[in-house]
Amino acid sequence: MLTPIAYGLAILLCLFVAFIGFRFLSVPQAAAAGYGVPAKDGDSVYLTVKGQRDLVYGILGLALLAFADASAVGWYMVAVALIPLSDTLIVLRHSGNKAVAFGIHFATAVVVLISGALMFLV
């Protein structure tokens, strides 16, 4: 019973990260506002970098799920949890919305760590 939950959560998280990346590439200003720190004119290069990064991390996670064992996916999840943790700090450091910092980014980090822990248990 734990295996489908662990893999299902990991797949959903990887798809979600890929979607976020795609959103930053397709509608960067709206995606930046949802991130918690609205973008300024001229920030398009940085938004493109963030979009590309998130898209690749999502695809990489899906590839690991398809071709690696659960332990490798677990370590991947633990490592990539640093991204939403650092996003929390970035939003707070730049006077962004605290509810977004904790309610989205920090909460995402917790869920990613839970996903990693579940992968270690299967």
Image (cartoon, grey):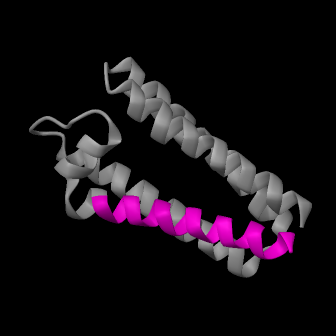
Against 28, residue 2 (above or below) is below
In the rendered image, the quadrant that contains the C terminus is: bottom right
Q: How many marks?
A: 0
Q: Is residue 112 left or right of residue 49?
A: right
Q: Is residue 86 above or below residue 2?
A: above
> Considering the image in quadrants, where does the N terminus appear?
bottom right
Q: Position of residue 73 (x, y in %)?
A: 75, 63
Residue 5 sits inside the magenta stretch: yes
Name the image quarter holding residue 21. Answer: bottom left
Report the residue at 20% width, 50% height from top: 30
Q: Position of residue 95 (x, y in %)?
A: 31, 19
Residue 46 at least partly seen: no
Residue at image location 41% in from the left, 21% down from the top: 92
Residue 50 in the magenta stretch? The answer is no
Residue that extends furthest to the front in the rendered view of this protein: 1
* Above or below 61: residue 36: above
Q: Residue at x 40, y 30 (%)?
A: 99
Q: Which residues are magenta?
A: 1-23
